[in-house]
Amino acid sequence: MTTSRPEVPGSIWAVPGMTALAVVAFTGFSGYAALLPVAPLWAVRGGADSAGAGLVNFVLLGTTVATQFFVPALIRRLGWGHALALGMVLLGAPALLHVVSDALAPTLALSAVRGVGFGILTVAASAAAVLVVSAGRRGAAVGAYSLALSVPNVILMPSGAWVAQAWGFGPVFVLSALPLLGVPACYLLGRHLPERATRGPGHADVPGAAAGASTYRALVRPTLVLLAITLAGGALITFAPQLVATGWLAAAGLFSLGLLSAVTRWRVGALADRVGAGRLVWPFVLVAVVGLAWVAWLVRTEVGEDRVVPWVLACALVGVAYGALQNLTMLRAFEAAGPRRVGAASAVWNAGFDAGTAVGAVLVGTVAVGAGFGVGTAITAVLCLLTLPLALGRRGGRTPQAGVRSP
């Protein structure tokens, strides 16, 4: 027998803990987004070549993925407040230490530490987003959480390199320490989440309850869909400057992708609460296929100013699918894992997101060397199309209510 959180009518922001979650997401992802394009530039300033610069974010994402699978156990051991605060400190404090040296070795070491912090943040915060509300409002909560983390991604990620070049690296390092300001919100959020000390082992909301093979098998479907769309999105984000004739065209395309992704990821959550996340996955897979095929057609040759409108629209279409499928696959992962495996579902989803992003850049870059970016992008469209049977299968209905085990 499990208990459920009472429904809180009105705006999702009226739910206790949601504002604190938004502060954690905004400050934490600000620290991630601001430094992501700048840390490699810092290493280049210190004498690193392009291969060395590429290692900076590879190390960041590698340690992120390696950490994510240990976060549920960390939450069980430390509790929500301490675990979230630890992630924010490990993500924010090393950013300030970059100013000490621009040599490659210390830059990689600091990136590794920041990756550990980011791994803790991503898993703990996304799990908190579904535990802070009743099951019937999970979609809206994930949407609100996604909006809070998307704002810095849309604003700071494209502008970080420009700030570093115009005003110096110092301001970017300070911005990247914003997670430290979110530490108090971690403890405020923790008060509204189930702690191990106050919840019995049979409670549906035990954070990070141990997961078995059946749980991970259930997560295969949403994870493969997520891998396909993040592989495509990661490739487009990485290579946009090489697909177009001028820098402002790349910025315009990435801005449309980022903006539509943020808005769609936010708004699709409430819709999923009404009609079920499973019923929405396959239409957005088709949107992704169409958008990526359009991009592939456009980038067979370098995109010039005469094709700015179709370029921006194609990127926007990919952004719609990119944002929606992030939200929907997260909800499907939580449903598939069941209410006692929220931590495991969060760890797998976040690892899938980061792995897909990293693999996309490598795969498309490798193909483009011999066959061009048109073929490379077309392959991402085909990979998304191949996940359509997974998106159609076991669609399910509305989000299960608290106390009812998910499929």
Image (spheres, rainbow, N blue to C red):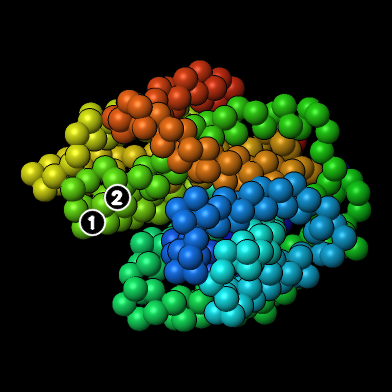
* Whether residue 127 can be seen here: no
> Would you say 111 lies left or right of 160 here?
right
The residue indicated by pointer 2 is 241
Q: Mark 2: which secondary structure? A: helix
> Would you say 73 lies left or right of 252 here?
right
Q: Residue at x 46, y 81 (%)?
A: 170
The x, y position of residue 205, in whole percent, is 78, 51
The x, y position of residue 272, in whole percent, is 50, 41
Residue 84 placement: quadrant:
bottom right
- Give the number of the disc on residue 247: 1
The x, y position of residue 380, in whole percent, is 41, 29
Residue 141 placement: quadrant:
bottom right
Which numbered disc flags the more N-terminal residue, 1 or 2?
Answer: 2
Q: How far is mark 1 from mark 2, CA to CA? A: 6 Å
- Does residue 28 sit above or below 334 in this rendering? below
**Hey, what amino acid is under mark 2?**
Pro
For the residue pair 326 and 33, the one nearer the viewer reads as 33
Q: Mark 1: which secondary structure? A: helix
**Hey, what amino acid is under mark 1?**
Gly
Q: Are dots 1 and 2 in contact, CB under 8 Å? A: yes
The x, y position of residue 217, in whole percent, is 72, 27
Q: Residue at x 82, y 64 (%)?
A: 79
Residue 355 placement: quadrant:
top right
Q: Residue at x 34, y 55 (%)?
A: 259
- Does residue 128 sit above or below 13 in this rendering? above
Q: Residue at x 55, y 57 (%)?
A: 56
